[in-house]
Amino acid sequence: MLYICPTPIGNLEDITIRVLNTLKEVDYIACEDTRHTIKLLNHYDIKNKLVSVHEHNEFVKADSIITDLQNGLNIALVSDAGMPGIQDPGKILIEAAIEKNLEFTVLPGPCAFVTAAIGSGIVEEEFTFVGFVSRKTKERKLVLEAHKTYKGELIFYESPHRIKDLLEDILDVLGNRKVVLAREISKKFETYVRKNVSELLTFLEEKPAKGELVLIVEGNKEVIEFEFTDFDIENLIKSRLEEKYSKKDAVRLVSKELKISKNRVYEIAMNIKYQGD
Ligand code: SAM
């Protein structure tokens, strides 16, 4: 069995009992950097073998790990921090396990973007995790262009020395949107800076960003009221009524789902006859 084990993104106490037990019990732990993971093991007095799976040898190592799994070994995969596979090695091994029909399980746990999304206070139901973007402005701008009309929030990972370039491109392509910069989550200097893009750029001139960063950018909130026909709206209200919502709740839900005014939905709802009336 392969166990994908999330580890702390800062505070060493952010680890589940199940992950700790798994790290103790497996035959060995595949990790990114043994010098990093050993600190976690020492902290919890876990004595187990560490095998390094660096990004550049991930393919080779995946093969030998798969062979070990086929031979019946239990192996845990960890990355330096957070959830393996999220902008970290992991995917190749999981793909190989699926292809070879080997059992694996992903243990729930810390992940920087999920924590930052909640802490930002601006992420609604829908968002996109973009992760690290290209270092090249042209490619970065293409990615931003692709998300320009997307209404959900966009979540980026970025290093302190490239955050300014990313923000400048965001200002250029997406406009002066609301942003939240989550810094050093779960660590001593955890901060959430809530500004718009140009304010954040000025702020960073005075106080350059340090440490690990997640940037959350508000989605495109331009309300396109008449993108939906009355017929579309009526059908959606009817679906909610069939789901046994009251007319009042159906209006509230549909207005939220389509991001259109309650008044417009209410007017359409008033003309619908249904048995609950
Ligand atoms: N696998 C990790 C996860 O589940 O979030 C992400 C690993 S990726 C190589 C490292 C990036 O994640 C950092 O550059 C930063 O953008 C983000 N990150 C990781 N830990 C963080 C923290 N404590 N605070 C803010 N961002 C963090």
Image (tube, rainbow, N blue to C red):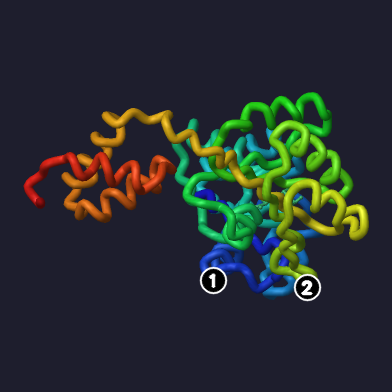
Q: Establish if 246 lies above or below 146.
A: below
Q: Secondary structure at mark 2?
A: loop
Three-letter code, disc 1: Ile
The part of the image, by quadrant, that contains residue 233 is top left
Label placed on residue 93 = none
Q: Residue furthest right?
A: 206
Closer-to-camera residue (157/241):
241
Could you say where residue 192 lies in the image, as x and y percent from the top left?
72, 63
Three-letter code, disc 2: Lys
Residue for point 74% across, 71% down: 42
Label placed on residue 188 = 2
Residue for point 83% across, 58% down: 211
Residue for point 64% across, 39% down: 130
Q: Is residue 248 left or right of residue 120?
A: left
Closer-to-camera residue (136/95):
136
Q: Which residue is mark 1?
A: 17
